[in-house]
Image (cartoon, rainbow, N blue to C red):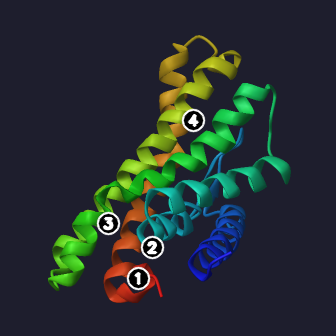
Amino acid sequence: MDRKRLQLLLEVAILGALSFVLDNLTLFKMPQGGSITLSMLPVILMAYRWGIAGGLLTGLISGLLQAVIGGYIIHPVQGALDYFVAYTVVGLAATTITWVLKSKSEGRKGSMAAAIVVGTVLGGLLRYLTHFIGGMVFFADAAGDQPVWLYSLVYNGSYMIPSIILCAIVAAILFTSAPRLIQRT
């Protein structure tokens, strides 16, 4: 195995585990699952260090750890959506990697921060969409008299929107202050 591939796999394992740990350090926990955390941050870091593949793989590892260690799974498809797919799609934050690296090389921190925020919001919204779909399909009984789509949108948005905002702010500050973090060695 070459050095770069080994480095990628080690970083995926370490940052996937860190994502799991951060998911358990909650700022606010919802009664039926979901919480405001910085768990997306390590996935976003890997997305900007290694591209989409690194981000997706780190998200998958994080979701796998979530599912195996304390996940709430009522159906295999719900488990796949809420853990594997939801955490994996955060790695798509790397779609703005060219913008981030160009801004970094030109020394334009404002543009770099904007690219990081856009990528983080995109990855976070894709995760939110995945939880929204899972909520509509598998947790419809919790909606009561309100429309299922509205219940899932509001419930999942109550923790996902703050998490997205928090991660976007921290990622922009962290990666523009220490741009070496997103540079492969």
Q: From the image, tell me which residue sits under label 4.
A: 131
Q: Amino acid at mark 3?
A: Ile
Mark 4 and mark 2 residues within 8 Å of each other at the beta carbon: no
Rounded to the nearest angstrom, the CA distance separating label 1 from label 2 is: 6 Å
Residue drawn at x 45%, y 82% is 184
Circle 3: element type: helix
- Whichever of callouts 4 and 2 sits on the residue coming sooner in the sequence is 2
Q: From the image, tell me which residue sits under label 1.
A: 183
Circle 4: element type: helix
- Whichever of callouts 1 and 4 sits on the residue coming sooner in the sequence is 4
Q: Amino acid at mark 4?
A: His
Residue 185 visible to an observer of this rendering: yes
- Whichever of callouts 3 and 2 sits on the residue coming sooner in the sequence is 2
Quarter of the image for residue 27 reads: bottom right
- Whichever of callouts 3 and 4 sits on the residue coming sooner in the sequence is 3
Q: Vertically, is 85 above or below 118?
A: above
| Residue situated furthest front in the rendering | 1
Q: Amino acid at mark 2?
A: Arg
Quarter of the image for residue 4 reads: bottom right
Mark 1 and mark 2 residues within 8 Å of each other at the beta carbon: yes
